[in-house]
Image (cartoon, rainbow, N blue to C red):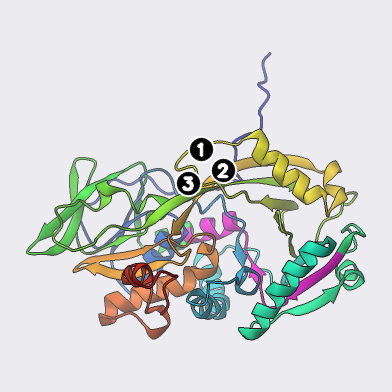
Amino acid sequence: MSDLLTSPIGQRRSLAIRPRAAELPQRADVAVVGAGLIGLSIAWRLAQAGRSVAVVERGSVGSGASLAATGMLAPAAEHEPGSDLLLPLALESLRRWPAFRDALQAASGREIDYRTDGTLVIAIGRDEVERLRFRHDLQRRSGVAAEWLSGPEVRAREPLLRPNVTAGILCPLDAQVDPRLVMEALLRACEAAGVVISEGVAVEGLERRSGRVIGLHAAGRTLTADAVILAAGAWSGEASLLPSDLDVPDLAVPVRPLKGQSLALRTTKRTGTLSRMVWTDAVHMAPKGDGHLIVGATVEDCGFTSGVTAGGMFALLEGARRVLPGIEEMEIDAVWSGFRPTSDDDAPIIEEAAPGLVLATGHHRNGYLLAPATADAVATLLTEGALPDFACGFGRARFTSSHQTGGRAVA
């Protein structure tokens, strides 16, 4: 056959552009380890402020969690028991998103499919309704905007859902973006601001002098910098990035990968689609401006075991079909897996771990939501020498406190 058939298996909704090829420079004001959402957001903010920035990426731009994500900006829907520490940061970052969006779109000339339709969390059957009621009570006690809906009220907002949907919570202030478009916009904005991005370059260690980090070693070369930002996502906890001989107590980064599998369905006028993000106990579904309906995501604690499995795809499709019968006629455009960077309490780690070394990692499934606040916090830290109030309390010391008290850490 002259034409090879291609399969979507293992393919993501990939970037339409690639960064300019760049070798590791010898010097930059700031070196960022990781060219994912968090790393590029920080790099762009710092470059905007006049810093020279070099980004070092072990794979390719967005190849960790960033292009595997759904793009949810959903602090209300995400709020659950034990996340009191995270909620104020999440709400602050959501508040910063419109300005972040406007600046990013202006700098890149690209739209990012920013939507403010909210999230609809739904239930089927008595047990799910009871769990949903508990979630709603928690949201109300926490002051989060959330409206209880009956089954008919849910279906009035989303007519394509099955009649067996018995209740729902509308989180009207939640939003979403398209990760692929955000990453393309960040890539364009970074390069326009002079950020140098080196792909396929694994960091081998840190350069230190008199107890201070002054650069990094990669690809047999040394990049010197006034500060190094570790934003390597699920790989941030790897020992090779933070060698044990660095004279900083308890430098280990408690971040591990949590695998997630997702798929993109192609909607048509015949199949219809959802008007907003819809969550169930099993899956979340997010409509995008390009006609895709993203269905995600499994949660698998299996280390860096990559790949798409039959069990994972079955769980996603069955979970979606249970409430949205129209998916049976939608074509599967792509399926993929990725690794969430998850800390011990599912909240990010943002701190100066040692002189010249800043950690910005562990965002779990809230990377897109927390990107503006994280980028602004790190920029403030490097400019003013201290984190802003909204980002305080997210250092690794909270895990020690949690261990001593026998529970989750508190601010």
Depth check: give the residue in front, 104 or 82.
Answer: 82
Contact flag, marks 3 and 1 (Cβ < 8 Å): no
* Among numbered discs 3 and 1, the one appearing first in the sequence: 3
- Number of other residues with Cα within 10 Å of mark 2, as a class: few under 14, some 14 to 19, many 20 or more: many
Give the foreground label among 2 and 3: 2
Residue identified by numbered label 3 = 63
* Among numbered discs 2 and 3, the one appearing first in the sequence: 3
> Tag 1's secondary structure?
loop
Q: Which residues are magenta?
A: 166-186
Percent of width and height locating residue 227: 23, 65
Percent of width and height locating residue 355: 18, 69
- Number of other residues with Cα within 10 Å of mark 3, as a class: few under 14, some 14 to 19, many 20 or more: some
Task: Identify the residue shown where x is 47% and y is 59%.
Answer: 37
Residue 74 falls left or right of residue 38: right
Contact flag, marks 2 and 1 (Cβ < 8 Å): yes
Residue 397 is drawn in which quadrant?
bottom left
Q: CA distance from mark 2 to mark 3?
A: 10 Å
Residue identified by numbered label 1 = 306
Percent of width and height locating residue 162: 89, 57
Task: Identify the residue shown where x is 34% and y is 74%.
Answer: 379
Image quadrant for the C terminus?
bottom left
Residue identified by numbered label 2 = 337
